[in-house]
Image (cartoon, rainbow, N blue to C red):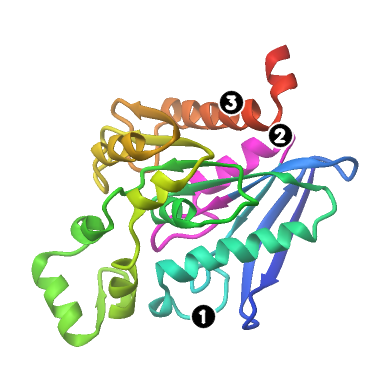
Amino acid sequence: MIQKTVSFQNDEGQAMSGVLRIPSDEGKYAALIICHGFLENKDRDLIADLANSLSYEEFITLRFDFLFHGESHGSLDETTLSQQIDDIKDALAFLETTPQVDMNRIGLIGHDLGGNACLLLDDPRVKAIATIGVRAHLDKFFQSYLSDYEMKEWLKRGIIDTAGIRLKDTFYYDMKKHDVLEAVQRKSIPLLLFHGTADMRHPFEDARALYQHAQQPTLEIIEEADHTFRFPDHRRYLIESIRNFFIRIFMRKRFERG
């Protein structure tokens, strides 16, 4: 197993920090880009567990900090969902420079808003997507973070700084440009949609809405699982299911051998 701390840039020279894991120097491997959630980073335990576990299944994994998060460039208050979609494109461009990556076998895994960015990305290099606890309706995204009063003050003042959240109103107005259900409806690639019934951030009914709009969906609603699948049994099942999903798509012969 090879693990590297990596950095890659966008067209404006802004740098993103990531961790790349490669099973071996020899051969070509399917690769999975793992995207963290709202106000989080690549080192959160869910993201690290996914990347580390899946790398032992002969997948290259790349977990990275979106711009303005973690160790990547810039101040958090500048972030937008559109920027995060572009960040995934830059991560794909970075994988193209990695000799062991088979660019015909690229998948995305996204948690929370990172999952929305994955679903909204329109890129033929991506052959399958797995999401965990994502919203189907972005107009309701802030309901679990801000009160009605805080929302009004944010849009009135143009910036919010409360409870660890510091964002400009450009984040809100940019998010309103995106329609997740419409994007999912257009996608002809396999989607795995994971959600827990005890998710207090985003209701699991959103996963059902995504499922109803998708062309090739697999839906997993896990009883009593929370937003980050923090309980060991839920976390193990999540990782195993995502593993099997991508093995079916990218390593069919190996999967059939069991």
Residue 63, above or below 229:
below
- In front: 59, or 230? 59
Residue 175, above or below 253:
below
Q: Residue furthest top?
A: 257
- Residue tagged 2: 56
Q: Amino acid at mark 1?
A: Gly
- Residue tagged 3: 244
Q: Which stretch appears magenta?
A: 34-59
* Whole-percent x, y for residue 14 in the image: 61, 79
Which mark is drawn over residue 74? 1
Name the image quarter holding the C terminus: top right
- Disc 1 to disc 3: CB gap under 8 Å: no
Q: Amino acid at mark 3?
A: Asn
- The secondary structure type at the circle numbered 3 is helix
Q: Residue furthest right?
A: 26
Q: Amino acid at mark 2?
A: Tyr
Residue 131: quadrant of the picture: top left
- Disc 2 to disc 1: CB gap under 8 Å: no
Left or right relative to 138: residue 116: right
The residues bearing labels 2 and 3 have C-alpha atoms spaced at a distance of 13 Å
Q: Residue furthest left?
A: 149
Residue at the spot x=27%, y=46% of the render?
202
Name the image quarter holding the N terminus: top right
| Front of the two marks 1 and 3 | 3
* Whole-percent x, y for residue 72 in the image: 57, 72
Q: Earlier in the sequence, mark 1 or mark 3?
A: 1
